[in-house]
Amino acid sequence: MLAIGYHVSMPAMMGFMLLSGIIVNNAILLIHFALEQMKEGMSKRDAMLESIKIRTRPVLMTAFAVSVGMLPVAQGSAIGLERLAPLGAVAIGGLVVGTLMTLIFIPVGFVWLVGEESVVEE
């Protein structure tokens, strides 16, 4: 927000809330799919690599679709949207950074923190 000259406002805070929901959902999908693969007998490293291979496209598609949809809002080009421009800016910038961090830090943290024995058969 500082880079593009917007101030912290209510629409910006709404953008942060939108962003946190999307990023957390993407992380949950990666972890859930890896745990399912571990239940089938894969090691945690192989399960996360498989999860990344299969779930990366949907995660990137979600980020791309929201970013493209928020472009008119971030530009504030329509009448009445100039007040919501911080929301679009936060959503676009945060999705770019957050998606990359999700695809890097969640798998690394998963492999470091999850034990092989932590998957319980139901």
Image (tube, rainbow, N blue to C red):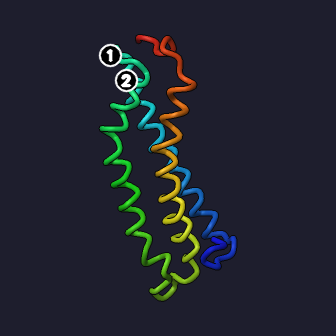
Q: Amino acid at mark 1?
A: Glu
Residue carrying label 1? 40
Quadrant assignment, res 29: top left
Residue type at the position of mark 2: Glu
Q: Position of residue 80 (x, y in %)?
A: 52, 85
Mark carried by residue 36: 2
7 with respect to 99 (left or right): right
Q: Which residue is at a point 42% across and 65% down the rendered structure image? A: 67
Tag 2 secondary structure: helix
Left of 30 or right of it: where is 83?
Answer: right
Q: Is residue 83 above or below residue 64?
A: below
Q: Residue at x 50, y 76 (%)?
A: 74
Report, in whole angstroms, how far the alpha carbon at label 1 lies from the one at label 2.
7 Å
Q: Is residue 19 above or below residue 121?
A: below
Q: Is residue 16 visible?
A: yes
Q: Which mark is residue 51?
A: none
Q: Position of residue 93 (x, y in %)?
A: 52, 64
How packed is label 1: few (under 14 Cα within 10 Å), some, or many (20 or more)?
Answer: few
CB atoms at circles 1 and 2 under 8 Å apart?
yes
Q: Residue at x 43, y 78 (%)?
A: 72
